[in-house]
Amino acid sequence: MPANLALFEQQLSTLLNSKSVKSTDEFADRFSTILDLSIRFQASTLFGNIVISTNKDLVKNGIKLALDIGYKVEKYKLQLNNTLSEIQETSNDLQQLSAALEKIPIPGFSAYIKSYLKKIQDVPTDEKIAQLQNFIKTIQIEDLMWFLAASQISLYYLTAKFSPIPPNPPSVSPSLGVVVTSPGNVLLLAAALKSAFKSKTANETATKCKLAIDTYTKTISGIYTGISPVGSPSITPWIGIF
């Protein structure tokens, strides 16, 4: 029985078109519920071992974190631009440059800059200034936020439990059964989610999210451990959750 991603797409489109959602927490909760309904007791490995237990809060936390960061970036975009201008004006003064960088309104960023300065404290001043200027120009907040979301979704699959039945050949009975050993291509999922949430319509976002999940889950892999016909341990590799 495959994952019911058509249901996921349909219900996500309805959610995205809804005007009743009041917070990122509510949206993330409903997103995770919709995904979980399409996966649990639906999706399975290539050999037919169905997903029987999941933790949808992992998905919720990842989506909420991404959206919260996204809203903060939009809210502070003008401040970020002003900060960049200030950096250019004070580019010959390391102390002022560092102070300007520390004002960038991203949680934990100020502490990170202080840590970064400590790390390069023995570098000549001119080089420090150049490194910090290049650093601020290359910050990709959107990539970071969707990587965080994708990482939580990958944990959802890594921690899922599967039915040990049917045994995977050559096993005739299970021992540990299905074990997910690789989270798959998380970067691929992050890029696909980023693209999906940049779509112009709710239906397009839902369709792209469905394709993102469908493509990603085919990169997850693991092993099945069981007992062979002669009573010895048997390990069968598998790729993809369908």
Image: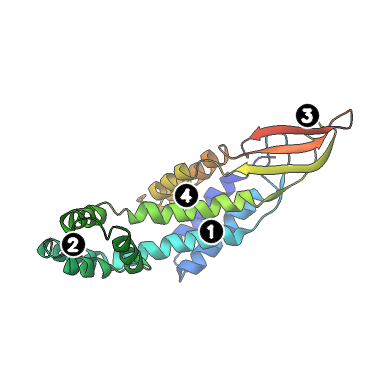
Q: Residue at x 82, y 40 (%)?
A: 174
Mark earlier in primary sequence (4, 1): 1
Residue type, label 4: Ala
Q: Secondary structure at mark 4?
A: helix
Q: Is residue 158 above or below residue 103?
A: above
Residue type, label 1: Phe
For the residues labelled 1 and 2, the Cα–Cα distance comes to: 35 Å
Q: Residue at x 19, y 56 (%)?
A: 124
Mark earlier in primary sequence (4, 2): 2
What is the x, y in percent for residue 154? Answer: 56, 49
Q: Secondary structure at mark 1?
A: helix
Q: Which residue is mark 3?
A: 169
What is the x, y in percent for residue 163? Answer: 76, 45
User: In the depicted view, which residue is nearer to us: 11 or 146?
Assistant: 146
Q: Which residue is mark 4?
A: 206
Residue density around tag 1, few if under 14, some if 14–19, many if 20 or more, within 10 Å: many
What is the x, y in percent for residue 227? Answer: 84, 35
Residue type, label 3: Pro
- Nearest to viewer (mark 4 / mark 1): 1
What is the x, y in percent for residue 199? Answer: 37, 49
Q: Secondary structure at mark 3?
A: loop
Q: Which residue is mark 1?
A: 31
Tell me if I can see residue 199 in this picture: yes
Q: Is residue 61 left or right of residue 239?
A: left
Q: Which residue is mark 2?
A: 84
Q: Is residue 129 above or below residue 166?
A: below
